[in-house]
Amino acid sequence: MKVRVAAKAGFCFGVKRAIEIVKDTVRGNPGPIYTLGPLIHNPQVVASLAEMGVVEIDNLKEISNGTIVIRSHGVSPEIVNEARVLGLDIVDATCTFVRRAQELAHDLTEQGYQVVVVGDRDHPEVQGIKGWTGGKAIVVENPAEAALLNKEAAYGVIAQTTQPLENFNSVVEVLRGTGAKIKVCNTICNATSQRQQAARELAGKVGMMVVVGGANSANTRKLAGLCAASGTATHLIETADELDPAWFNGVNTAGLTAGASTPDWIIEEVRRRMSEIEEQNGPEQEEEMKDAV
Ligand code: F3S
């Protein structure tokens, strides 16, 4: 059995940048340092930041001093103001691609468009973008929801940065079909589409796919969904310990990919463990083949 790693997998630009920003902040700051929610959706990385003294909070009301790091998902302007009023030092690690979506959402609203965000309603990035429209944006998750919108409005359509392009295009097509005036701004980031395309291509060529990432990572779950949709058996794991040798039975080539919040060391650990399983399974499979002859 061979193990093939997707051409693009793991940490994206925005996540790498956010981690560097936090590390720099820790170096030059006596603390306390907080993140509003986990810095990235990967429990292993969050645990290592906690060891460096970075404390995750759920709500600004929990703190009264120190430094708050805004994570790559970004936040609404209200939250930035709340932090200012509390007198906190603000370190902004919002990904530049998310910032662009926020600015577009703001500008489209100013221009009189009803902003439609194609994305996961409960995702922090989407809630942050909605905040930049003064809470006026409508969130639609799929074309069926788009079909229910009032056809009279002028829509400014943007995407959660990690949306699959197909879903975004399908929503746009539905809105176009209603005859409503629409302005489309594709805010899906390249890192996401490149990882999705590489995962889809690889899934089409292998007997089984392993997708590595935090269980709470939306982009990792989407990668797994795309691989499974190709008809290839797909397993979503957080760490190498979750690999089950039984998945590899009868598989000639296994594929490996990882979400944008998965660090290289976890991908490498999984790849190594997959190769070990390959070595353990190898002789058995040869025996089975001999039996068959
Ligand atoms: Fe930014 Fe795209 Fe990553 S929006 S955080 S580079 S997935």
Image (cartoon, rainbow, N blue to C red):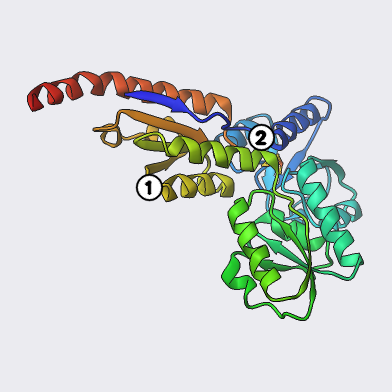
Query: Which amino acid, mark 1?
Result: Gly
Q: Secondary structure at mark 2?
A: loop
Tell me if residue 285 comes above or below residue 149 in the rendering: above
Taking the spot 61% from the left edge, 62% from the top edge, the residue there is: 170
Q: Is residue 94 visible?
A: no
103 vs 292, left or right, is right
In-front residue for pair 278/80: 278
Using the image, tell me which numbered label, if any, was put on residue 231.
1
According to the picture, the residue beneath numbered tag 2 turns out to be 12
Ligand 1: image quarter: top right
Q: Quadrant of residue 144?
A: bottom right
Q: Residue at x 68, y 63 (%)?
A: 172
Residue 102 visible somewhere in the drawing: yes
* N-terminal label among 2 and 1: 2
- Quarter occupied by the N terminus: top left
Q: Quadrant of residue 59?
A: bottom right
What residue do we see at 43% from left, 50% from top?
229
Spatial CA span between label 2 and label 1? 26 Å
Of 52 and 168, the residue lying toward us: 168
- Ligand 1 within 8 Å of disc 2? The answer is yes
Spot occupied by residue 280 in the image (x, y as percentages of width and height): 26, 20
> Mark 2 near mark 1, Cβ–Cβ under 8 Å?
no
Residue 63 appears at what percent x and percent y? Answer: 77, 50
Question: Which residue: 63% across, 32% down?
Answer: 11
Eye-nearest disc, 2 or 1:
1
Task: State the residue in front, 45 or 196.
Answer: 196
Dividing the image into 4 quarters, which one contains the C terminus?
top left
